[in-house]
Image (tube, rainbow, N blue to C red):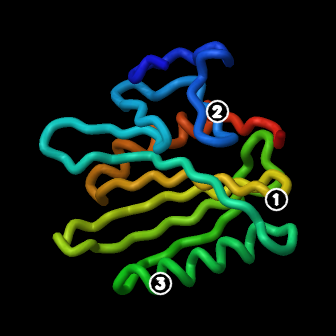
Amino acid sequence: MSPSSQQPAIQASAARIGRWIIPAVPFGWTWIPDFGIQKTGGNTVPSNIYLKEDELLSGDQLNPYIQAQIVLMKRTFLNPTIAGPAPLQLSGADEAELLMLKHQPMNQVTVIQVQHYIKSGKWIGIATLTTTEPELLKVRPDFEQFMKLVQISPAG
């Protein structure tokens, strides 16, 4: 895979992380195997999009899973601001939700995480854009473009 490709790659050359299929990377971003993509430049903290997978252990709905994630976030971060979940429309998903998290790490930079939770059967895909508050408006369109390009392979 070309690290800064703008054109969709043929399926055979698409990168993968589990069931995530990544046919192309937005311009200016770099592919990181087994992680996702990252944008660096200038004197800014790198922004990244992390792709991971999980599985529903009980039930068949996404919302209880997200509520458990919110509990973990509240335990992990000091006074986080959480928005959502809100419904998303994603091709190939049984359900999809958007969640946003705002928090300050130890160096006092405000960090924003935009998370897409995608359910297909018992599989859950989580795509997380992590960036600083000043960079959010610059990189969010790339995240949205990336999410339109990625695909989910059928369960196998």
Quadrant of res 75: bottom left
Q: Looking at this view, is 134 or 70 the one in front?
A: 70
Point out the tag, 2 or 1, that comes first from the N-terminus: 2
Do residues under tags 1 and 3 come within 8 Å of each other at their CB atoms? Answer: no
Q: Looking at this view, is 81 or 3 the one in front?
A: 3
Which residue shows up at 37% across the image and 86% down it?
79
For disc 3, the marked residue is 74
Which element is circle 2 on? strand
Q: Which amino acid does label 3 sit on?
A: Lys
Which labelled disc corresponds to residue 21? 2
In which quadrant of the rendered image does the C terminus lie? top right
Q: Distance between the residues labelled 2 and 3?
A: 31 Å
Give the vertical position of 18 relative to 3 (above or below): below
Which residue shows up at 26% across the image and 55% down it?
134
Q: How many residues crowd mark 3 within 10 Å: few (<14), some (14–19), many (20+)?
A: some
Point out the tag, 1 or 3, that comes first from the N-terminus: 3
Q: Which of marks 2 and 3 is in front?
A: 2
Which residue shows up at 82% across the image and 42% down it?
155
Q: How many residues crowd mark 2 within 10 Å: few (<14), some (14–19), many (20+)?
A: some
Which element is circle 3 on? helix
Using residue 38 as the reference point, say whether residue 94 is left or right of it: right
For disc 1, the marked residue is 122
Point out the tag, 2 or 3, that comes first from the N-terminus: 2
Q: How far apart are marks 1 and 3 (CA)?
A: 25 Å
Q: Which amino acid does label 1 sit on?
A: Lys
Quadrant of res 29: top left
